Image (tube, rainbow, N blue to C red):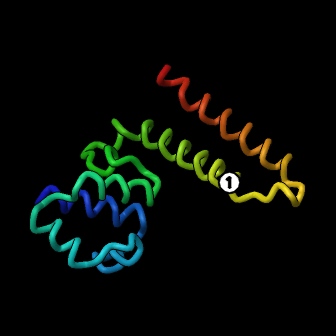
């Protein structure tokens, strides 16, 4: 089994698809691009990071062969990803419609989450 086969299997399992075409559709990747990656037995690092971000895991987790070693890091990454989504939501809230308090709450929740997540690394 090639290295890329394990990587692609992890991606498919994470996004709950059965075949390459479904995976390409969900990730908005051309099938020919995937075929090229398979032939080279490698996904370019930049594209791997994009895929990882899209599916809410770290590139390190995707490339890992041992789930247990990275489970804690992946949970933190997922939590951080969720916080980033909350903060991203702030950008689109309309202050003219009285959503200032909602913005404050989301920022507070996001910052609290980041601090909690960082405790294990500080």
Q: Which residue is mark 1?
A: 91
Measuring from the top left, give residue 98's x and y in whole percent: 89, 55
- The relative height of residue 28 versus residue 111 in the rendered view (above or below) is below
- Location of residue 113 (image quadrant): top right
Who is closer to the viewer here, 19 or 36? 36
Crowding at dot 1, Cα within 10 Å, few <14 / some 14-19 / many 20+, comes out as few
Residue 109 to residue 38: above or below: above
In the image, what residue occupies the spot 37% across and 63% down?
Answer: 13
Q: Is residue 115 left or right of residue 1?
A: right
Q: Is residue 1 visible?
A: no
Which residue appears at 15% of the width and 70% of the height?
Answer: 36
Residue 5 screen position, x and y as percent? 19, 62
Circle count: 1
Visible in this render: residue 73? Answer: yes
Using residue 89 as the reference point, say whether residue 72 is left or right of it: left
In-front residue for pair 1/45: 45
**Residue 33, percent across and down?**
22, 72
Q: Secondary structure at mark 1?
A: helix
């Amino acid at each position: 089994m090639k290295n890329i086969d394990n990587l692609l299997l992890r991606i498919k399992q994470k996004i709950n698809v059965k075949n390459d075409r479904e995976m390409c559709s969900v990730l908005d990747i051309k099938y020919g691009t995937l075929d090229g990656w398979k032939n080279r037995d490698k996904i370019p690092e930049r594209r791997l990071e994009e895929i990882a971000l899209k599916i809410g895991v770290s590139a390190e987790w995707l490339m890992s062969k041992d789930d247990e070693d990275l489970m804690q890091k992946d949970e933190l990454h997922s939590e951080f990803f969720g916080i980033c989504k909350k903060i991203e939501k702030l950008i689109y809230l309309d202050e003219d419609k009285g959503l200032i308090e909602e913005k404050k709450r989301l920022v507070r929740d996001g910052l609290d989450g980041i601090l909690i997540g960082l405790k294990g690394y500080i």
